[in-house]
Amino acid sequence: MNLKEACPVLHFADLGDERGKLVVIEGGEAIPFEIKRVFYIYGSDATVVRGQHANRESEFVLINVAGSSKVRITDGESELIIELDKPMTGVYIPRMLWKDMYDFSPDSVLLVLASTHYDGKEYIRDYDEYLTEINRK
Ligand code: TYD
C-alpha cells in the first residue's frame, strides 16, 4: 500500500489575526469524516509508546496542538513515520492500519479526532492478529 497516499498530511486553514492563531476543523470538510469523538493525550514522556493497535472501524486524524510527537503507521509491509509538530497540520489514518505514537515532547498535547464512538471490540491490540486479519501471514 502507498501509505503516503493512504495517510495524507492535512493542512488546516489558519484564521488567525493579530490577536493570535485560530484553527478550525470541520468534520466532513477539512477531514474526510464526521467527527464522533475527540480525545487528547498529554503527559506521555519520550520513553512511552502508545497506540500499538489497529482499528477495524475507526478513522482518525492526529494533530499535535502543542509540542511534538511521532506516529509510525504500517500495513504490515510498508512503514510511514510522520512527525507531528504543528497545530495547523494533522495526519489522516484510515481503518485497519497499525499505528504507534512515540517520542512525545514534554509539552506534547496530541489531539485525536475519531470517526466513531469508542468501542473496545473494534481495536486489534495484537500485532500477529492484525497480520492475520489483513491476510499477510
Ligand atoms: P488506549 O487505546 O490504550 O490509548 P492510546 O491508543 O491512545 O494509547 O486507551 C487507554 C484506555 O482508555 C483503555 O482502557 C481504553 C480507554 N479509552 C476509552 O475508554 N475511550 C477512548 O476513546 C479511548 C481512546 C480510550
Image (cartoon, rainbow, N blue to C red):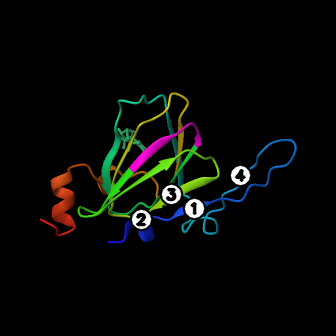
User: Badge 4: few (under 14), some or many (20 or more) residues near its Cα, within 10 Å?
Assistant: few
Query: Which mark's residue is nearer the viewer, 2 or 3?
Result: 3
- Residue range corresponding to the magenta coloring: 65-71
The answer to which of marks 2 and 1 sits earlier in the sequence is: 1
Amino acid, disc 1: Leu
Mark 1 near mark 3, Cβ–Cβ under 8 Å?
yes
Percent across and percent down for residue 121 are 30, 54
Q: Is residue 82 left or right of residue 54?
A: right
- Residue for badge 2: 94
Q: Looking at the image, is 84 positioned above or below residue 26?
A: above
Mark 3 residue element:
strand
Amino acid, disc 2: Pro
Query: Mark 1 to mark 3: distance in Å?
Result: 6 Å
Question: Closer to the camera, 107 or 31?
Answer: 107
Mark 4 residue element:
loop
Amino acid, disc 4: Val
Residue at the spot 44% in from the left edge and 45% down from the top edge: 70
Q: Is mark 3 within 8 Å of ligand 1?
A: no
Mark 1 residue element:
strand
Mark 1 near mark 4, Cβ–Cβ under 8 Å?
no
Mark 2 near mark 3, Cβ–Cβ under 8 Å?
no
Q: Is residue 112 left or right of residue 47?
A: right
The mark found on residue 23 in the picture is: 4
Amino acid, disc 3: Val
User: Badge 1: few (under 14), some or many (20 or more) residues near its Cα, within 10 Å?
Assistant: some
Q: Quadrant of the C terminus?
A: bottom left
Residue at the spot 35% in from the left edge and 56% down from the top edge: 73
- The quarter of the displayed image where residue 135 is located: bottom left
Residue at the spot 32% in from the left edge and 72% down from the top edge: 1
Query: Mark 2 to mark 3: distance in Å?
Result: 10 Å
- Residue for badge 1: 10
- Residue for badge 3: 91
